[in-house]
Amino acid sequence: MFKRKKTVTAVDLSDSKACGVIAEVKNGQIEVLASHLIEGGGLKKGLVVDIGATAGILKDLLKELKKGAGDSSDSIYINVSGSHLDTGNCHGAVMISNNRGVVLKKDVRSVISSAHVHGIALDRMPLHTLVRDYIIDEHKGIINPLKMHARKIEVDLLVVTGISNYIKNLKRSVNQAGYQIKEMVTSGLPPFYSVLEEEERKTGVVLIDIGAGLTEIAFFHEEKLKKLAVIPKGGDDITESISKRLKVSASYAEEIKKRYGCALVGSEEAVEEVVLKDSNGNVKVINKNEINEAVKRSLDKILSRVEAKLEEMDCLQSAPCGIVLTGGTALLDSMIEVAQKTFVLPVRLGSPRGFQISKALNSPIWSNCLGLAKYALIKETASPQTAARLKPLAFIKEKTADLFSDYF
């Protein structure tokens, strides 16, 4: 898969954290040369709310990464998140204009551009364009239309888009930090590379990434992204529920969630007493059930929203491998058990695999960042044929696409 040595920098920016890695391929495996995590990502529900503050966080993060790995590129791969992300189907059609009546690369670019023009609103920017089907003279199921004789070529696309101004704010933050964006990748998709097994990718699986401010749902089948959705709920909502119930600060509630939080209420351990101390030094004793009830109240709302979205996406019948949970909130005690009862499907925890990493990075918290690094390395080091076959994310910069970027 990997043909030449290359080093990449990948950054995962979210509401709760900014984490990044510098990685390269060594002896056929991906080795992380440096990693760093900063608490507080400077975003709110995936959006930049202060360009200067976000730029400062990125600058600090990347400075630490360079210390750990030595010199590195000033171009980075970074995720794009937020409930403004959307997927839609686009259809384009053009007549073949050359005298030979043969499909050329420019015809392929033209038909994809036509689909974008007719299917994407002016205030939105395409992030990923995924070809579902080429149609030649009404004949469907064409994989590669190049050099085929045709009168007309059509294309059906799945396009992931975001609101242009939100994406521009992220880009400005990176530029202000002194870096350039090499590629932006939609959050929730990189774990395709870092946590999913080959059988899951092929047969069908739903990947649910529960972060601090957002929950991202991606359905993969036949090694292709089929559907994507974002819910503006996440671990921060659970923290807020604990804060209100126990009347403690948000930061203390976050600590309580990580230390004692459990998705189940009424377990034997829940009767254990927990000593809490507020900022004024006042002490009170509660049992764990009080914490777990606050967790359950908020978690039930999140899972209910996810369940409704999955019904809307109509993908579970095509996902025999069930659900893979990742993201920091997936680490809640008894989370997998509760998810299995909710969705009545097989559920497992998705942690990174296939990397030479420390124990600290072997966590769902790093699944997005490591997946982004692997995607980058596949793209930059694989042969053109391998990259075309394997990469499921094609970044469209100018509302056109190179033919070989449209395949997984």
Image (cartoon, rainbow, N blue to C red):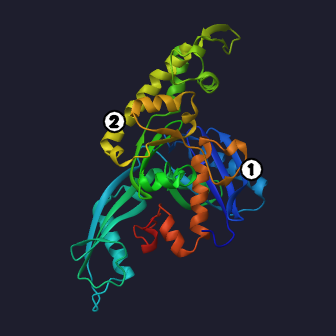
Q: How would you rate the neighbour count of disc 1 (Cα within 10 Å): few for under 14, some for 14-19, many for 20 or more?
A: some
The residue at the far left in this view is: 138
> Which kind of residue does numbered mark 2 sit on?
Ala
Alpha carbon separation for disc pair 1 and 2: 41 Å
- From the top left corner, tell me how far across and down residue 382 is, in percent: 59, 70
Label 1 sits on residue = 64
The residue at the far bottom in this view is: 99
In terms of depth relative to the viewer, which is nearer, 330 or 7?
A: 330
- From the top left corner, tell me how far across and down residue 203 is, in percent: 42, 53
User: Which residue is located at x 69 percent, y 70 percent?
Assistant: 5
User: Which residue is located at x 30 percent, y 42 percent?
Assistant: 312
Between disc 1 and disc 2, the foreground one is 2
> Which kind of residue does numbered mark 1 sit on?
Glu
Label 2 sits on residue = 308
In terms of depth relative to the viewer, which is nearer, 12 or 140?
A: 140
- From the top left corner, tell me how far across and down residue 364 is, in percent: 59, 42
From the viewer's perspective, is residue 138 above or below residue 104? above
Task: Looking at the image, tell me whether mark 1 or mark 2 is earlier in sequence order.
Answer: 1
| Disc 1 secondary structure class | helix
Q: How many numbered circles are shown?
A: 2
Q: How would you rate the neighbour count of disc 2 (Cα within 10 Å): few for under 14, some for 14-19, many for 20 or more?
A: few
Taking the image as shown, residue 100 lies to the left or right of residue 227, namely left
User: Which residue is located at x 58 percent, y 33 percent?
Assistant: 331
User: Which residue is located at x 49 percent, y 70 percent?
Assistant: 388
